[in-house]
Image (cartoon, rainbow, N blue to C red):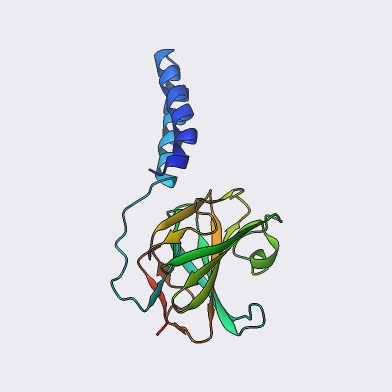
């Protein structure tokens, strides 16, 4: 379980045990089931990234919602949007090896993460990653249920392919922007695993 989960799991566990000791069986069962559900949400399985140095991996578990043309700072490119349901692993990972140039927190709305306008309007962390091939931009985007985006890295930090970089709590969205030179291989409707599934090849 990821470290951030303990602040939610431990109070529920203590409350469930206390209810059991007091003989409040129904309450104890409900609270302990809730505790188990929260612990499941904060699970953090090990992942083995591909050995291929040309790949861009998914930064999150979930379903690819869209792959669309989008410019970034005047540069042509494409955006890949991934929806994370409440059942998906919510630990986020680096799509490529590189160095964090900037992490910009942007407050905003909490539209349903499946809506296209969530990419621009919702609360989010915008992460600029410098790599050997150029800049990748990816976003941790809060949704209607997720109200907290957490990035564990700071500008200047170096990351490996598939390394853990943060967390979004309770259902959300992640966007990855790549320049036009990258060959997108992911497609809408595809289920992807963070740090493992290949989104693109950038030769």
Q: Is residue 56 left or right of residue 126?
A: left
Furthest-top residue in this view: 22
Question: What quarter of the picture does the C terminus occupy?
Answer: bottom left
- In the image, is residue 51 above or below residue 3? below
At which x and y percent is residue 83?
Answer: 52, 63
Near-viewer residue (58 or 166): 166
Camera sees residue 4: yes
Who is closer to the viewer here, 129 or 147? 129
Q: Is residue 110 left or right of residue 88?
A: right
Residue nearest the viewer, comparing 98 with 194: 98
* Outermost residue, front side: 156
Quarter of the image holding residue 50? bottom left
Q: Exactly how many numbered labels are in the figure? A: 0
Residue 199 rendering spot, x and y as whole percentages = 43, 75
**Residue 15 horizontal/vertical position (percent):** 47, 23
Foreground of the two, 156 or 33: 156
Above or below, 57 relative to 7: below
Give the image location of residue 147, x and y in percent: 62, 48
Q: Identify the residue at horizontal 63%, vertical 53% (top origin).
A: 144
Residue 91 visible: no
Residue at 31% of width from left, 54% of height from top? 46
Residue in the image at 41% along x and 21% along y: 17
Asked which quadrant contains residue 52, the reply is bottom left
**Quarter the N terminus occupies:** top left
In the rendered view, tell whether residue 67 sits above or below residue 174: below
């Amino acid at each position: 379980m990821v470290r951030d989960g303990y602040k939610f799991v431990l109070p529920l566990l203590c409350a469930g045990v206390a209810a059991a000791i007091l003989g409040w069986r129904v309450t104890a069962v409900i609270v302990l089931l809730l505790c188990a559900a929260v612990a499941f949400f904060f699970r953090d399985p090990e992942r083995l990234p591909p050995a291929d140095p040309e790949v861009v991996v998914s930064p999150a578990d979930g379903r690819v919602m869209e792959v669309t043309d989008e410019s970034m700072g005047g540069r042509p490119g494409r955006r890949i949007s991934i929806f994370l349901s409440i059942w998906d692993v919510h630990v986020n990972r680096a799509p490529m090896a590189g160095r964090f140039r900037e992490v910009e927190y942007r407050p905003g709305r909490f539209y349903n993460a499946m809506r296209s306008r969530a990419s621009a309007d919702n609360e989010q962390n915008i992460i600029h990653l410098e790599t050997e091939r150029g800049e990748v931009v990816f976003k941790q985007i809060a949704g209607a249920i997720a109200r907290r985006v957490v990035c564990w890295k700071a500008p200047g930090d170096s990351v490996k392919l598939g390394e853990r970089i943060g967390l979004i709590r309770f259902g959300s969205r992640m966007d990855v922007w790549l320049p036009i030179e990258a060959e997108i291989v992911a497609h809408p409707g595809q289920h992807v695993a963070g740090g493992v599934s290949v989104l693109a090849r950038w030769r």
